[in-house]
Image (cartoon, rainbow, N blue to C red):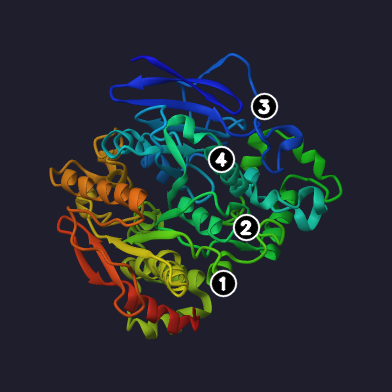
Amino acid sequence: MSAVIVETAYGKVQGQQMEDLYVWKGIPYAKAPLGPLRFRPPQKPDAWTGIRDAAEFGPVAPQTSSVIMNYLGNDIENMNEDCLYLNIWSKGADDKKRPVMVWIHGGAFLSGSGSSSWYDGSSFASSGDVVVVTINYRLGILGFLHLGEIGGEEYASSGNCGILDQVAALQWIKENIAAFGGDPNRITVFGESAGAMSIGVLLGLPSAKGLFQQAILQSGAASNALPSSKATHIAKRLLNELNIDHDNLSKLEELPVQQLIKASTIVPSMSLGPVIDGVNLPQSPEEAISKGSAKDISIMLGTNKDEYRIFTFFDPLWKNPEPNKIMNIFQHTFKDLLPALLKEFNETQLNQDLFDQLMTIRIFTYPALQLAEQHVKQGSPLYMYRFDWESPVFNGGLKSSHAIEIPFVFNTINTPNTENLIGNSPNRQRLADTMHQAWISFAKNGNPSNSSLPEWPRYELEKRSTMILDNECKLEFDPNYQDCLGWREATKTSV
């Protein structure tokens, strides 16, 4: 292992050579968002003199411990509010101008980091000769507390700090990645869950325009930006929990970070996320995309067959529940929509499988269909997939749930912790090789087609071609389409 020094716009960084590639970790792309910079947009990093060591990952964003995220290999041992760092894998700090892939991690906008072992960019860099970048961004209350309607102009951007961190990282990458062997004009953003939902926002965010040319959205789309009114309601609840007067918001800068994180646990999941604030995000991402905001972007988009299973599988409410408790879950979740949904899906028996099916449509497949239709109506390229491979762990109980595809994408199926989720069956590597190559092909060509797959045409409104990713990959008419039509009819929504 030897060192390699690269000069960025802010100073020199020293990474490490690991076999046939180089790795730089913990490079700051913005100032530490502390004190008066808390709840403010990211600022450019301070320059430094000398050579900065880039051999260790930077701290992860403050967050609570999550059973599911821990199961998925999330490590929060090194946690600090000073968290705006990125990591780079490349075959060489030269002038080769390799395609760049920027990973935005998931975790419901509440947890996760770019330093998870699942997101190791080594295989992409080594076998694909692409430059991989992973990033941290502010999460939860620190990244998405919308104070603009309460505190005025000073806090106008507070509800989108996490998204603006991503923009700042992309700006840093565009400015500096050439020195690491990457092409600043051939950048693909890719992400899963909240990472993909973030990309859905970036596709409609004016300040992100021109910072990437391609996008891969895994299990997330463009429907997760909160209306300003709802985000303000959440902010008021949290200010009340913290005993902060609306005319004394500066006190937020002084509170211990753990007090902020603890207070944020009183609001429901996904209550802290990107906001249609009228400043950074003038309209919903879906509306912007329907007007052509992403028409020049090539998109790859997909979901997993049984997305929601991982959430009910670890939820004690679904362990031998009584019928009245099941009814309460359905009524609380779907409210007035429940009768129409049951009629549309011809169901009379309420159970976990039906709940998983409906939640998968609601959160994942229907938003994906909306984004696909909006994008292809612009005449823009979009490639659709569905990941159908089922995990054998827990006697197959997880099925093809949320996040299972990640180790296949990164070719990290033998990384510690992945066996918990995907087992150790020998057929894994063949699928990992196939998917890994598809992602590399997309980064290089804007098209995932390659010799290990059947022909993969664009998704169009007539044919709706969708690649099924499984032990045997095949092209089908979108298998989620009928469910999405049923959801659309039951909820009377339209694209």
Identify the residue shown where x is 32% and y is 57%.
Answer: 447
Q: Is residue 130 left or right of residue 46?
A: left
Q: Earlier in the sequence, mark 2 or mark 1?
A: 2
* Residue, disc 1: 291
Q: Residue at x 53, y 41 (%)?
A: 174
Identity, as a three-letter code, of the amino acid under mark 3: Asp
Q: Determine which residue is flagged by label 4.
A: 169
Whether label 1 touches label 3, CB < 8 Å? no
* Viewer-side residue, 382 vs 339: 382
Mark closer to the chain start, 1 or 3: 3
Residue 382 in the image, given as x and y percentages of width and height: 38, 65
- Helix, strand or loop status at disc 1: loop
Q: Which mark is residue 206?
A: 2
The foreground one among 256 and 184 is 184
Q: Amino acid at mark 4?
A: Ala
* Mark 4 and mark 1: Cα distance apart in space: 26 Å
Q: Which residue is mark 3?
A: 46
Q: Earlier in the sequence, mark 3 or mark 2?
A: 3
Amino acid type, callout 2: Pro
**What is the x, y in percent for residue 423?**
21, 43
Q: Does residue 405 appear anywhere in the picture?
A: no
Q: Earlier in the sequence, mark 4 or mark 3?
A: 3
What's the distance in space between the residues labelled 2 and 1, CA to CA? 13 Å
- Count all numbered tags in the image, as a single digit: 4
Circle 2/circle 1 CB separation < 8 Å: no
Label 2 sits on a secondary structure element that is helix
Q: CA distance from mark 2 to mark 4?
A: 16 Å
